[in-house]
Amino acid sequence: MKRIGMGLVGAGFVGPHHLDAVRRLGYVDVVAIAGSSEAFARKKADALHVPKAYGSVEALLDDPDIQVVHNATPNYLHFPVNMAVI
């Protein structure tokens, strides 16, 4: 099966649980995390063993290694994040 590169937006409370579930699929590589700041994203990426970190959704979307985005932001942020992805 072809491997899929995934980016995670929102690595706060729920994000790490979603990453664990996605990794169990066996064919998804978690490529990057986007957070509210690059420093926060880097801290989470290091803790979760994710190679790249971005301080914005737009920067994550510019990464050519990402084919799918997992949105684990709070509910009120789902719409703007999903619209950026679309």
Image (cartoon, grey):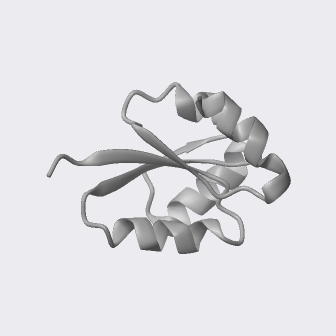
Asked whether 75 or 48 is in front, the reply is 75
Report which quarter residue 53 is drawn in: top right
> With respect to residue 4, does 64 lie above or below?
above
Whether residue 71 is visible to the viewer of this picture, yes or no, is yes
Residue 20 sits in quarter: bottom left
* Residue under the image location 39 percent in, 37 percent down: 67
Q: Relative to residue 62, is residue 73 depicted above or below?
A: below
Q: Where is residue 37 in the image (x, y as percent from the top left)?
A: 75, 44
Residue 56 seen in this snapshot: no
Image quadrant holding the C terminus, namely top right
- The residue drawn where x is 78% and y is 59% is 74
Q: Please name whichever residue, 64 or 79, is drawn nearer the observer in this view of the structure.
A: 79
30 displayed left or right of 55:
left
Return the x and y of residue 82 as percentages of the image width and height.
66, 39
Task: Please identify the residue farthest to the right as the structure is shown.
Answer: 76
Q: Residue 57: where, in percent of width, then height?
A: 66, 36
- Determine whether, in the image, residue 1 is placed left or right of residue 73: left
Count of residue discs:
0
Q: Depth check: 86 or 14 in front? A: 86
Q: Position of residue 41 (x, y in %)?
A: 64, 51
Which residue lies at the image location 25% right of the left edge and 58% below the top edge? Answer: 27
Question: Going by the image, does 53 lie left or right of 26?
Answer: right
- Does residue 68 appear left or right of residue 73 in this picture? left
Seen at 54% across and 57% down, the residue is 45
Quarter of the rendering containing residue 43? bottom right
> Is 23 above or below relative to 68?
below
